[in-house]
Amino acid sequence: MTVTRKPALPFPARDRYPIMCYPMPWASPDHSTVADQMGLDAPSPARGLKAMYMHIPFCQYLCGFCPFVKYKQDTERIRQYLINLKREMDSYAAAPYFGGAAFGSLYMGGGTASILEPEQVADVVGHARRVFTFADDAEITLECSPITVTEDKLRQVAAAGVNRVSFGVQTFDDEIGRASDVAQDGDTSRQVIGWARSAGIEHVSIDLIYNLPGQTVAHVRSDIDSALAVGVKQVTMFPLSVMPHTKLFRDVNERKVARIGDLDHELELARAATDHLGELGLVQTSVPDFSLPEVTYRHARIHFEQFEDLLGLGAGAMGTVNDYTYVNVAELKRYRELTEQGLPPINAGQQTPESEKPRATMAMGLRMLEVKRATFVARHGAQPEDLFGPLLAGLVDRDLITVDDEGVRLTSTGTLFGYDVAKAFYSEQIRAVGQKLAESLARKRDVIDLELNASGGAA
């Protein structure tokens, strides 16, 4: 009997947690000195456009698979939260560092950013434009759940300046969606995408999840076909992450849903999705993102490719300002207390040690598939091989990256394990901190102190 051996995989598991910033914040701050640590009292260097992220942590329906900071919709809590959010904006806007800075993108995520009423979206976007400077062609994204928008609402948010929407579709298949605790059916998703385009919002992006319970290659291909048929221009493909402290995690353990495919099945679906998106003319622009050639996702490029500041606002938001990387408090009461005092509502944060900066360039750049050699040299005054020679050689030997005169780029295999390859450049300390931070945010618990050694740093 002939035994067919499966090719060895480059990693025993697949990291599904996106890279949001690097290094992961680890130090509990002295709130009275955060502004000094960020360097907010000095003007910003004359560089490129910055990015802004606002977290809206409220949902009409708490999806069973979602690990992000979120709370059940409540009218009064939302009203108070937006007051606090504008206070946080005002605090940063008053700093000299942002006085001469301009933003090229604003991304309102969640939670469910579209839980806000159109007037509230207009108020928050308008406030940001009044207190900060935005480029005339700034990309303004509203993250939406299909069950929270109407045709009129999309027209109103478009009039308020929203020119890009991202719908959390997850799947168009009703049977798969019910098993996975997706909030809406496929027809609703198709309908709201059509409404967005009718409202004049041409850049419509959607999230699709693969390896949902019972999902096959045919299901994944059908989801992609459905997306392109209704005018979607960008698709973000996420493998299902069964995170602790979520309903889906409990359902899987209690065998209330169909078995989720193993790693081989997940990779089969990922390859099928990548191939089919390519057949339909979409280009892979990052580990999870595929876009039509004429579409630019500016927010991601500013932060991950151009390495400009990301001002994170709101409970649970992450950001990087002037090489100070931070995550805000997740608990709403604490967020209100700090913003009412005019203090940055930071949960954990610190200046990036010099030893971590080249690692940040590699990890964040590879999220966007490549790190250009010229960019690395300009940022660090050295070649990638000078600082990471053995690591690069090992990744080349495993067919995960290519290294040439242009720079370092993920291979097709490397792209399947994109976060694993990128996180290979993490220091051991930051890798440990990242896991603790993810668990704390999922449980809405503030990080009191994640220092891993007595010296208080992860350098």
Image (cartoon, rainbow, N blue to C red):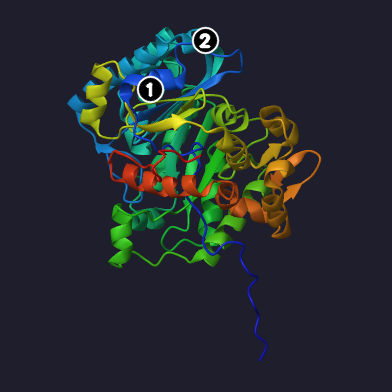
Residue under the image location 54 percent in, 26 percent down: 202
What's the residue type where badge 2 is placed? Pro
Left or right of 216, for residue 384:
right
Q: What residue type is labelled 1?
A: Val
> Of the numbered discs in the image, which one, if any, rests on residue 43?
2
Q: Choose mark 2 or mark 1, whichever is in front.
A: 1
Q: In this view, does 361 lie to the left or right of 15?
A: right
The residue sitting at 41% across, 49% down in the picture is 435
**Quadrant where the N terminus is found in the figure:** bottom right
Above or below: residue 272 compared with residue 350: below
Name the spot of residue 194 as percent of width and height, x first: 47, 33
Work out whether residue 326 can be spotted.
no
**Nearest to the observer: residue 340 or residue 251:** 340
Farthest-out residue, right: 405
Quick check: 376 above or below 413?
above
Q: Position of residue 112 (x, y in %)?
A: 34, 34
Q: For the residue labelled by badge 1, is the local secondary structure a helix, a strand or a loop?
A: helix
Residue in the image at 29% along x and 38% along y: 446
In screen coordinates, is 394 left or right of 40? right
Q: Hey, which quadrant is residue 327 in on the image?
A: top left
Q: Which mark is residue 34?
A: 1
Is 77 located above or below residue 265 in the figure?
above
Q: Where is residue 257 in the image (x, y as percent from the top left)?
A: 33, 64
Q: Where is residue 419 in the image (x, y as percent from the top left)?
A: 55, 49
Front-most of residues 26 and 298: 26
Q: Do the residues labelled 2 and 1 touch (CB within 8 Å)?
A: no
- Dividing the picture into quadrants, the one containing residue 356 is top right
- Tell me if residue 193 can be seen: yes
